[in-house]
Structures are given as C-alpha cells and as structure tokens.
Amino acid sequence: MQSAQFRGEGLDLSYYDRTVVRAASLTVDPGRVHALVGPNGSGKSTLLRAMARLHKIDRGTLSLGDESVSTLGKREFARVITLLSQNRPVPSGVPVAEVVEFGRHPYRGKWKARDPEGPAAVAWAMEVTGVAEMSSRGVDELSGGELQRVWLACCLAQQTDVLLLDEPTNHLDLRYQVELLDLVRDLADDHGVAVGVVLHDLNQAADVADVVTLLHHGAVQATGAPSDVLTSERVSAVYGLPVAIHRDPATSRVSVHPVHRTERRLAQMA
C-alpha cells in the first residue's frame, strides 16, 4: 500500500447559511497520524467529512500528492481515500467476512467484475484488525469493540492511500480503545498509511498522534507536535476551564489534567 500527502487548504464549510469552519487547512502525511481535537461543535467531524468529500466545500481545495482530487469520480476517490464514520448501519445476519468484503466495492465495477486482488486484501485487513477468527459470525452478534474493528477492516480492505477516522474510540471500553489506537499507530508505522483521526480525548491524541490540530469555533487554533499544541494556556482558553499539562521528562509526551473545583478549593486553602 502506497501513500501520498493529502491536503485540504483554505476550507470554508457551512450548514445551510451558517459557516461552521473557516479557512481551515489540514495535511495528512504518509506514515503519520494527524489528530483533530477541540470542544464539541468546533468543526472537527465536519472538516473530516469534507476531506472525505461527504460535506460540500464552499471554498478551498483538496489534493493528493501533486494532483487535485476534484476530478476523481466516486469510485476512483474511494480507491485512494476512505472514512470510518461514527455511525454505520449494522446489517442483520451478515457474516463478518462479507461485511469486510464490502470494502472491495470500488474495485468491482458496475457489474461486480472480477477482483483478483480482493481475497488477499480482505484476508490482510481481517488479520491486522484481529477479526479473522470471527469471519463466519454475524456482525449483529458482536460487541461494540469487535464491530468497530470489523468496520475498520472494511475500510482497510479498500487499500486506500489515506485513512480517515471519525471518533473511532467512541462507546468503546478501555481495552478496545487501547487496541484500536495501537492498530492506528501500527498502520502508520508498519504500512505507511496516512491517518487522519478525530478524537475527543486529548490524552489519546497526545499518545497516538505525530501532529495535532486544535479547532475552536470552526477555526484552527494551532497545528504541530502534541507537546507544542497542547499547552496549558491554549487548552484552558479553548475548553473554558483550568488545565494543567504534565510532560514526561523521559519521553517528552504530554498529558492533560483538568483542574477540578475541588482541587482549586484545596489549593486556595493550602
């Protein structure tokens, strides 16, 4: 699987007559994870959906490598960029293997033409996501974490240059959150995939991402390494509460710690 840099530049996005994202730019590089963070309503998911051509762009451009993607048809686009959205319908009684095979649709043509590379792509996607052993189970029998991995396998079976993930850890317990983010990191490190991911948890973003973009009220506040973007002053201002940032002296990784009212009272009493 080969990746190319994927860029959205100067994007203005709206719902009806209300602009929700203004002049936003985002670059997703091969072999790197780019996390979008920010409060609810900051425009993260809208920006990601626009990058996947699922939300109309009022102004701005999308390009993959040196070429614009505006001229690509739906099937061509689906061969280079895919999105794991927050909500997908769960087909009743359909085995896991068949759901993962849905990802090969862009390669099968109008009349379901032969797809000689399909079986190997599906097998690889199921193996790396850890769902191969459940291939014959119905997807409606799976837990939330298992189902999320199946949908991720479906996206990977497309063998795209770019993988976009919209809040993939939502509704997952701690184990599956860790496993999914480890897999995201492996896809970038071991397979050269360009990954863009929306995350609510700032600590998850700091752990998994090479680059973080912080959005607020539809505008990019900062883009860069997690330790540069997630500062106490910036995060406190954006989220509207005191936030302490701790830096690991050995790894330079940062962790975000909201300062609760109880802690503030204790500090005042000390």
Image: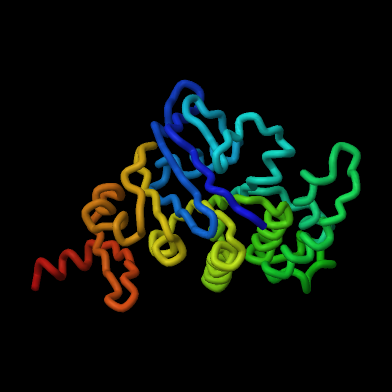
Image coordinates of residue 91 in percent, x first then y, are 78, 52
Q: Residue at x 64, y 47 (%)?
A: 82
Q: Nearer the viewer, residue 183 or 6?
A: 6
Q: Is 90 placed left or right of 115 in the picture?
A: left
The N terminus lies in quadrant: bottom right
Q: Nearer the viewer, residue 227 or 243?
A: 227
251 shown above or below 171: below
Image coordinates of residue 232 in percent, x first then y, are 23, 58
Q: Is 238 placed left or right of 17 in the picture?
A: left
Q: Residue at x 74, y 38 (%)?
A: 75
Q: Residue at x 39, y 32 (%)?
A: 23
175 shown above or below 12: below
Q: Could one spot residue 30 in this view of the protein? A: yes
Q: Could one spot residue 173 in this view of the protein? A: no
Q: How many labels, in total?
A: 0
Image coordinates of residue 173 in percent, x first then y, are 55, 68
Q: Is 132 placed left or right of 229 in the picture?
A: right
